Amino acid sequence: MTAPTFRILLQHRAVRALAAACGETECHLVGGCLRDRALGLPSHDVDAVVAGRGREIAERLAAALPARLVLLGGKDFAAYRLVGQDLTLDLWDRAGTTLLADLARRDFTVNSFALGVRDGLLADPFGGLADLGRRILRATTPASFTGDPLRVLRLPRLSLRLPGFAADPPTFLLARGSSPRLVDVAAERVRDELAILFEHPEAHRGLGLLVALDLYPGLWLGAPGEPGRPGGAVTELEAIPERCRELRELDPEAASHVEARAARLAATFAHLPVRAGRGSRDFLELFRDAGYLTRQAAAEVALLLAEEEIPEDELGRRRFLHRTGRLWATVAVSLGARTADAARWRAAVRPLVDLARREGALLLDPPRLITGEEVQRILGIAPGPEVGRALAAVRQAQVDGQVRTREEAVAMLNLGE
């Protein structure tokens, strides 16, 4: 008999199309779509496993939905992704293995039960439904983490994704024991997991788990599995939402542009210990070069780390906005979360917001008032570095509020003669 909780999944258009494409081949829904349905959480992804004919079924399904077919490949089995409108369906071919063996290779018991797409029968050999009820994250088998150390990072990610869930003690110990082996995992997989974790509004809880798993600050220092202390990183992450709220009260538009993930990542580097003369920015470069951050993300974090406080004078504020550009609001929030003097931060951020509202575009990227050819003519010089220096001086004068029009730029150059 079909479990009532999951009956609606079998009526999903994509699942009906999957059943038709499979014909007599055994097919089960597995993983997050079942878990989330049981918990009443929204989910737009479907995971399924078939007992053979994976490529043929995937191609038939792609034509029926319709959807774009992506070959994912796999170390031990074939995998296919179908991307359609408002839906992603991952299809795994377990040819040569049993359903039990397929479920046993999964990370946590809450992801290790299956629903037959034709008969609606549940297979739950590892007690995943009971663990959902108890809100427990339990390793499916003792080899869950040794088989794929990336799952050490999925533990805090799932703890954030699933409300009220926590790892049982034996699972936590298994995960921590596999932390040193995270260096053996492809960097882009680690990067993707970290991106999801630090995107979450409660990333401070995730960071706390990384500390307990001996991944922070160890992974940041190139030594995952090494116990360490978080310094003020968790506290800074906790303060970011409050600083965002205060900025939103001053300027909702500015607050909407805060890159919270960049601010959270910057906090993790700001509180790293100094080792062998290396500081936060050195470790940021190592982290980037290891592949755990994209170059763009690392550049954003570096910009946040470069600022120490919000200036309290007009000229300083103008230059601050120009230096930080589109990330000025993110930098302001980051500094507010880092400081121990919140009152001083509030006093400094208000005039900064007012200035950004009045002249933001002119400061972030001042319009070009004069060309290089005009500089050559005014100064009577040939092309060369001196032209670039003159243009840079005009641009700096624009940032400082001393030059606002083309006429003023020409007058400045003439005075410079």
Image: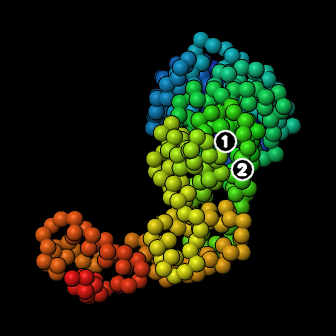
The residue labelled by disc 1 is 217
- Which residue is at 66% across, 41% downward? 217
Q: Which mark sits nearer the N-terminus, 1 or 2?
A: 1
Q: Residue 377: which quarter of the image?
A: bottom left
- Residue 261, can we see it? no
Q: Amino acid at mark 2?
A: Gly
Depth check: 40 or 332 in front? 332
**Taking 18 as reference, is 294 above or below it?**
below
Q: Secondary structure at mark 1?
A: loop
- Which residue is at 31% across, 77% downward? 394
Task: From the top left corner, tell me how far across and down residue 399 is, in percent.
Answer: 40, 77
Q: Secondary structure at mark 2?
A: loop
- Which residue is at 67% across, 61% downward? 338
- Which residue is at 18% across, 65% downward? 384
Which circle marks residue 231 in the picture?
Answer: 2
Circle 1 residues within 10 Å: few <14, some 14–19, many ≥20: many
Distance Cα–Cα, label 1 vs label 2: 9 Å
Circle 2 residues within 10 Å: few <14, some 14–19, many ≥20: some
**Taking 302 as reference, is 389 above or below it?**
below
Q: Residue furthest front?
A: 277
Q: Are marks 1 and 2 in contact (CB under 8 Å)?
A: yes
Depth check: 10 or 225 in front? 225
